[in-house]
Amino acid sequence: MSIRPGVPISLRKASSELGIGITPLRDALLQLEGEGMVTILPRRGIFIREFTLKDVKNYYETIGAIEALALKTAILHITKDHCTIMRQINKHIFESTKRGYFSDHLKLNKTFHNTYLNLSENTYLPSLWNNITSRLYYSPTEIVQMEDWDRLCCDHHDHLIDALEERDLEGAIHWMRDEHWSFRKQKKYIEQYYHLKSEE
């Protein structure tokens, strides 16, 4: 089923279309409210919350901080085999973009980042990263694929791998936190990608 921001969610209709009971559906929506995905207004209904540029900025800053923290210990455990796998994945990421396989692109990108996040000694970080990126890549609007942005992101990935191979922690953190997840540096692409305009 397709639900647009600002349109009330009918529990009965959603329950029927999804094939689940109203009670578990209501519980799921309450959880989504806690995660900031929906808004529940007494006597007015349940609404998909608007996705704003500020949301993306907050997500980017948080993801960058998570990656920086994860890399501090992941770099101690990463091997040449891990780096080889990451280079192969990165190659497939860009190939999937050129072919227009956006769902494959997202899965490959997730696999790429989790390759080193899962090596962190802080086992909470991968689940936090996955939770936040799942919100980041959720959007009620039609996604626009941009090959130039994807090429830039893949370049960041290559620089990260170079830093990991050299055991250069400062460089690895720079390419992820200060480049790849820099809202300021990615803003022009983000605005096009999500059809969002600057609030400034």
Image (spheres, helix red, strand yellow):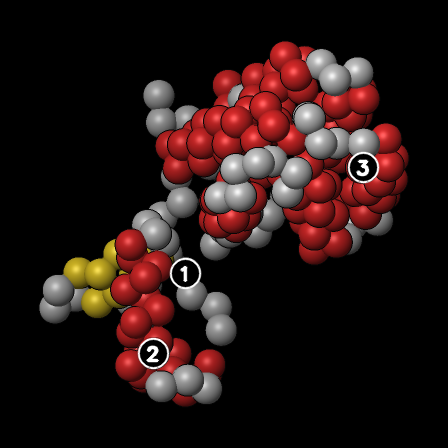
Residue plotted at (71% across, 47% down): 111
User: Between 100 and 168, which is closer to the camera in this rendering?
Assistant: 168
- Residue 166: image location, x then y, percent: 79, 16
The answer to whether residue 185 is left or right of residue 36 is: right
Regarding mark 1 in the picture, which secondary structure is present there? loop
How far apart marks 3 and 2 lie (CA) works out to 41 Å
Residue for badge 2: 24
The answer to whether residue 77 is left or right of residue 65 is: right
Q: Is residue 94 visible?
A: no
Residue plotted at (57% across, 17% down): 178
What kind of residue is marked 1?
A: Arg
Q: Mark 2 or mark 1: which comes first in sequence?
A: 1
Q: Is the C-beta separation of discs 3 and 2 under 8 Å?
A: no
- Return the residue found at the far left: 43
What kind of residue is marked 3?
A: His
Residue for badge 3: 82
Q: Mark 3 or mark 2: which comes first in sequence?
A: 2
The answer to whether residue 97 is left or right of residue 2 is: right
Residue for badge 1: 4
User: Between 11 and 35, which is closer to the camera in this rendering?
Assistant: 35
How many marks on residues? 3
Residue plotted at (36% across, 48% down): 50
Of badges 3 and 2, the one in the foreground is 3
- Residue 101: image location, x then y, percent: 77, 53
Regarding mark 2 in the picture, which secondary structure is present there? helix
What kind of residue is marked 2?
A: Pro
Q: Quadrant of residue 43?
A: bottom left
Of badges 2 and 1, the one in the foreground is 2
